[in-house]
């Protein structure tokens, strides 16, 4: 079974999958997009938005994005774009060296599972490709792109449940939210609406000829017969923001 470095499974369990329904979620894809649009408009009307200032500073900085910065980006983005809906429901990890797909196929992926009954809904786990995103020749913009792209998936899973899987997860709401974030960041900088990342667009320098092939910008860690992954997480909530 494929796992993250801390032991979390990122492979779908086929015996669990057929039990998933949307009966626990009433938020539609369209409504999820409207929530982001309305919340973002309200944040723009604030005279002083601390979270937006923090996120803007992290986006515009030229410093490398370390683990602390990743947590800060996720937390600030939650307040600026996602109306706080991600709080306590999103964790993230770097990929493990044994996960070969993250070396030549995946930049990032989102896994999910049911949360504890006391919380309800789902929890999500983002896995980021260390070989690709931590490569010295890759610009920090690709890290930003991967984080924000996967956060949109997390948001839609949390609000819409497992129905957010349709269209490979790239629903109309996904495109709407990606467009809002792309415009805020600066059109063309991250290209969140592109479902595949052209690494040449994010290279600091041109690598040797022949290594400029394309990598999927994201995927939901497919398991047997499924486009999405479910992870089995121990009781600890380490890493949640």
Image (cartoon, grey):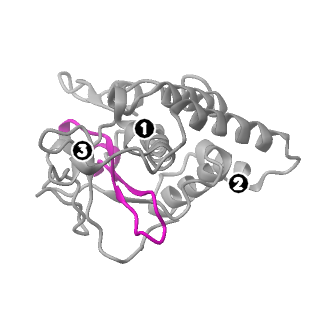
Q: Is residue 177 left or right of residue 106?
A: right
Q: Earlier in the sequence, mark 3 or mark 1?
A: 1
Relative to 104, does residue 129 appear above or below in the rendering?
below
Q: Residue at x 52, y 29 (%)?
A: 173
Q: Is residue 136 left or right of residue 142?
A: left
CA separation, marks 3 and 1?
A: 19 Å
Q: Is residue 173 left or right of residue 76?
A: left
Q: Residue at x 52, y 58 (%)?
A: 69
Q: Which residue is mark 1?
A: 142
Mark 3 residue crowding within 10 angstroms, few (<14) / some (14–19) / many (20+): many
Residue 105 occupies quadrant? top left
Span highlighted in magenta in the image: 104-133
Q: Position of residue 9 (x, y in %)?
A: 21, 60
Q: Which residue is mark 3?
A: 221
Residue at disc 2, secondary structure: helix
Q: Residue at x 43, y 68 (%)?
A: 239
Residue at disc 3, secondary structure: loop
* Residue mark closest to the camera, 3 vs 1: 3
1 in the magenta segment = no
Of residues 78 and 164, the one nearer the viewer is 164
């Amino acid at each position: 079974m494929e796992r993250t470095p801390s032991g979390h499974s990122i492979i779908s369990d086929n015996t669990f999958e057929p039990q998933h329904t949307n009966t626990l979620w009433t938020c539609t894809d369209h409504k999820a997009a409207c929530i982001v649009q309305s919340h973002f408009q309200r944040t723009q009307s604030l005279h002083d938005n601390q979270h937006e200032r923090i996120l803007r500073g992290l986006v515009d900085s030229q410093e490398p994005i370390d683990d602390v910065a990743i947590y800060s980006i996720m937390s600030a983005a939650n307040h600026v774009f996602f109306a706080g809906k991600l709080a306590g429901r999103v964790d993230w990890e770097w990929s493990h060296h044994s996960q070969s797909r993250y070396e030549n196929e995946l930049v990032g992926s989102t896994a999910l599972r049911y949360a504890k009954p006391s919380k309800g809904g789902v929890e999500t786990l983002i896995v980021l490709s260390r070989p690709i995103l931590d490569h010295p020749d890759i610009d920090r913009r690709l890290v930003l792109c991967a984080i924000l792209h996967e956060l949109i998936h997390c948001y839609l899973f949390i609000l819409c449940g497992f129905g957010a899987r349709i269209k490979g997860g790239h629903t109309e709401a996904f495109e709407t939210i990606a467009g809002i974030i792309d415009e805020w960041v600066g059109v063309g900088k991250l290209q969140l609406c592109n479902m595949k990342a052209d690494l040449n667009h994010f290279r600091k320098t041109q690598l040797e000829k022949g290594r400029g092939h394309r990598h999927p910008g994201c995927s939901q860690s497919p398991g047997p017969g499924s486009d999405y992954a479910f992870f089995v997480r121990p009781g600890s909530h380490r890493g949640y923001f």
